[in-house]
Image (spheres, grey):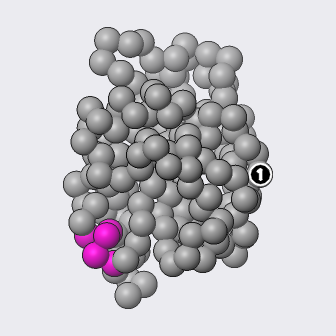
Amino acid sequence: MERSSPIHLTPGICLPLVALPATDGSAIVLATLSGRSLVAVYPWTGRPGVPNPPDWDDMPGAHGSTPELEGFRDIFEAISQTGTRLFGLSNQTTAYQREMALRLELPFPILSDAEGAFARALRLPSFKAGGDSYVKRLTFAVLDGRTEHVFYPVRDPETHAAEVVDWLTEQA
C-alpha cells in the first residue's frame, strides 16, 4: 500500500551531513560538495532471475528504475559538460547496487541510503511494498549543499534524463 506523504524536499533546503557509501568505494556527503550535483533517487532495481518484491507490480511508479538509470547513462556526457556531478540513490545496499552499476555500465556512482538516514532527514516520499519501505522516484539538483530544483513526480522514467538535461541547459 502506498504511503501518501507530501514532498518536503523543496528548493533552498540544506542537505543533511550524512555520509553515503558509493559504488565507486567512496563515501559522499552531498551537503559538503561545492558546485552543482544531480541526484536521481529511485526505489529499487531488479536483477535478472530475481523476483520483484511482493506487491511491486501493484505500485504506481514502482517500475522504471533500470530504464531511468540507462537514460542518465546515455546522456552522462551532456550532464558532465555542464560541470555537474551525477549520482543515483536508493535504499539498496552498496553491494547490490554495485552489481547493477557494473551490469548497466553506469559511469556515475550510486549512493546507498540503506539505513534510511538521508531519506528520513529530508522526509523523502516513500511507499511500502511487501512490508518494506522504498523511496519514491524523484531527482533533485544540489548547489553548494542546498537543494536547487526538484523533479517530482517523475512521470516517465524512460525520458526523465532528457527532461533533466533540458533544465540544466536552461540554467547555463
Badge 1 element: helix
Report the residue at 25% width, 42% height from top.
105
Camera-side residue: 32 or 141? 32
Position of 57 relative to 72 (above/below) = above
Report the residue at 51% width, 78% height from top.
35
Position of 121 relative to 91 (above/below) = below
Residue, far front: 25
Residue 168 image-quadrant placement? bottom left
Report the residue at 68% width, 17% height from top.
131
Residue 121 visible: yes
User: Would you say the magenta stretch is mainly helix, strand or loop?
Assistant: helix
Q: Position of residue 96 (x, y in %)?
A: 45, 27
Camera-side residue: 120 or 18? 18
Q: Is residue 81 magenta?
A: yes
Position of 11 relative to 87 (above/below) = below
Q: Position of residue 85 (x, y in %)?
A: 42, 66
Direction from residue 10 to residue 64 in the image, left or right: left
State the quadrant of the N terminus. Answer: top right
Q: Position of residue 100 (x, y in %)?
A: 35, 32
State the quadrant of the C terminus. Answer: bottom left
Residue, far bottom: 172
Q: How many marks?
A: 1
Position of 119 relative to 76 (above/below) = above
Camera-side residue: 98 or 37? 98
Q: Amino acid at mark 1?
A: Ala
Q: Position of residue 156 (x, y in %)?
A: 38, 49
How packed mark 1 is, by other alpha carbons closer than 10 Å (few <14, some 14-19, many 20 or more), is: few
Q: Which residues are magenta?
A: 78-82
Report the residue at 62% width, 34% height from top.
114
Residue 91 image-quadrant placement? top right
Which residue is disc 1 drawn over? 121
Q: Is residue 83 magenta?
A: no
